[in-house]
Amino acid sequence: MLRKIFPAILILCLCGCATIYNPATGRKEFIFINESTEIAIGKNVATEITKKENVLEDEKLQERIEKIGKKITAVSDRSNIKYEFHVLDNKELNALSLPGGIIYIYKGMLDKLNNDELAFVIGHEVGHVAAKHAVKTIQANMAFQLVLSIAFAAMGKDTSTATNVARATNTAYNLIALGYSRKDEYLADNLAVKYMYKAHFKPQAAISALEKFKTEEGFRLKILDYFRTHPSLRDRIKLLQETIPQVISPKSDS
Amino acid sequence: MRNKLLVWIAFLIFMQIISFLYAETVDILGMQIPLIEGAKLVKDEQEGSLKAKMVNYTVEKPLNEVVGFYQSFLETNGFRIIGGLEEGGSFNASVKRNDIQFCIRIYAQDGLTRIQFIR
């Protein structure tokens, strides 16, 4: 019994230990690592992306996501960090965000979505970054020493632990690629709609984007499948239909 | 004689407790990290999550003095540092030297300066 409640007691004890308010989640949180370390982790995990996927160097596509990304990040709950947007040469409907603000959008998204719908996808990933979902996932599931190793490896050569770092980085990448909890996904959806509205995109496009994903659902079951790691699209659409009117109502204009 | 022995044992135990509370160093992965004079252990070492251990100290010294002490220690001892000074004068860094790596946070709370080591 005690073993079950002990983590809860520990969490309560930690509440006074320099927890920081996160505007994206609306809660005080204790993240062990500082922002610079988070960014370093993200940079190193990005190396795993480039091993598995091709980054597309297309000026037009890059300009498109950067233009939308800039508007979204400027109104986000974490506008102080430098976000990076990249297009991956993959026709799947997928997107991925890393600790510290590196965001990958699959080319499939750019082919199928209009700008407002893309703003939802980008806003969703920015929401994950603002809420620090990736770093919390890594922190909760990996040995703290390994997490630090990933960060320091990004600073420079550390050949004595190169193999361990590579394995740890791969583990961190897999944790992120497997996706987040339903609660985190719903929050990211809500944040996306909020950011879309503030950046003058049409929040209703969130629904049309998800409807487009729905037509693609079920064709692929790969580990990076956007749909498999996320809650059901029907549930997400239903929740957004309730959220969007609250976001765009006059009371939300403050 | 027996009473003298008991008093002596009690005194030794008392001194152990005091030295534990007011230790001059903290062991981080085998390295003895100095504690600024007057630092007092707040909580026993505990797990911040399943994967990290944390130990906290408080000291009745100004924040900038404690930050300066540890900045100097880290730089003098060749630690690589990610992070550092934050808004408001607090200090939050991930530090590494060879195989020794940990996080150190120094901030003001309830009129005292807190030093937190996470490993």
Image (cartoon, helix red, strand yellow):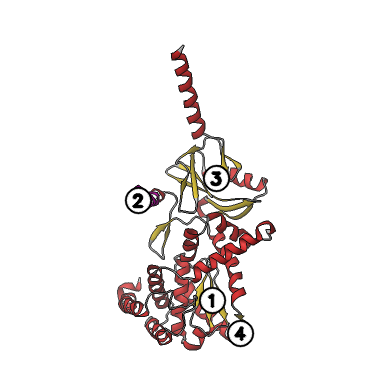
Provide the secondary structure element on which disc 4 rests. Answer: loop
Going from N to C along the chain, the mark reached first, 1 or 2, is 2
Residue A24, how many percent across, how many down?
A: 41, 66
Which residue, given by chain and number where applicable, does mark 2 sit on?
Answer: A5
Residue A178, how many percent across, how many down?
A: 48, 71
Q: Is residue A72 magenta?
A: no
Q: Which mark is residue B64?
A: 3
Mark 4 neighbour density, 10 Å: few (under 14) some (14–19) many (20 or more)? few
Along the line of sight, which residue is nearer the eye, B67 or A7? A7
Residue at point 56% right, 53% down? B93
Going from N to C along the chain, the mark reached first, 4 or 2, is 2
Badge 1 and badge 2 both on one subunit: yes
**Which quarter of the figure has residue A159?**
bottom right
Residue A54, how many percent across, how many down?
A: 61, 79
Give yes or no for contact between labels 4 and 2 (Cβ–Cβ under 8 Å).
no
Magenta stretch: give its range: A1-12
